Amino acid sequence: MVSRKIQLADADIQFDAAFFDASTACNLMRELQESTPWETHTVRIFGREIPAPRQSSWHGDVHCSYRYSNVLYRPKPWTPALSQVRARLIGAGLGDFNCVLANFYRSGSDSMGWHSDDERELGDQPKIASLSFGASRRFCLRRKPAHLAKVGALSKHQLLLTPGSLLLMHGDTQKYWQHALPKTASVGMPRINLTFRQIAPQNGG
């Protein structure tokens, strides 16, 4: 893994712009788009349930149920494409991931709001391996208001997630930071994001 560390206080983040080469990333984008059973989930915002501004699919080992926005999602089986990406991560020694949330952003109009991947099922210091395919999109980080940075320390950061790239977040990152993928009018092409996680058997629902 050829990576650079993102220098943020109370975060452990590495970025590899070419974890998959261009040809492999292109082939995976096509296979993931065609073989993943995409759904439009609902999210609860200010007490209202609305369709999420993206499509998603939750996959993993049988015990890896996952609760998001007060909804319990039971894992779908691994597809060949998801298994291929998972094997590459495990083979690189990056973690023994047993589940993945796949998100399909159909264009720049689809987005992800501010959040942390800090659900109880993921443990105190979750490791999140985020893979990107398709269109490049801007990824934003901000320190949580309850944990303001020391004077002089960065409290915001952004980077461009390119096709084939890997963003690895672990340590206290989810405790102190939030992240988002904002809308953008300049992107008309689709993007797929895979966020691999690990859920312990005793935490599954």
Image (cartoon, grey):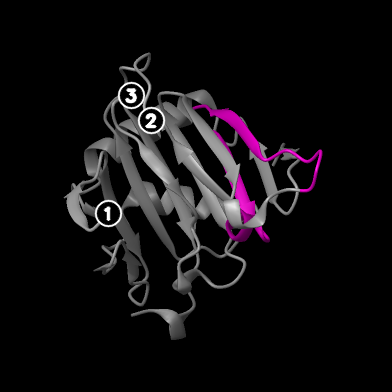
Q: Farthest residue toward the right?
A: 152
Q: Amino acid at mark 3?
A: Gly
Gap in angstroms between the C-alphas marked 1 and 2: 39 Å
Tell me, yes or no, whether the two marked residues, 1 and 2, touch with CB atoms within 8 Å: no
Residue occupied by mark 1: 46
| In front: label 1 or label 3 | 1
Q: In the rendering, at what x and y percent does residue 202 appear?
A: 45, 86
Which residue: 33% across, 80% down?
A: 205
Q: Earlier in the sequence, mark 1 or mark 3?
A: 1
Q: Is residue 77 magenta?
A: no
Q: Earlier in the sequence, mark 1 or mark 2?
A: 2
Which label number is shown at residue 179?
none
Q: Which residues are magenta?
A: 150-176
| In front: label 1 or label 2 | 1
Q: Is residue 153 magenta?
A: yes
Q: Which corner quadrant holds the N terminus?
A: top right
Q: In the rendering, at what x and y percent does residue 58 appear?
A: 31, 58
Which residue: 60% across, 61% down?
A: 175
Query: In terms of image quadrants, where is residue 78?
Result: bottom left
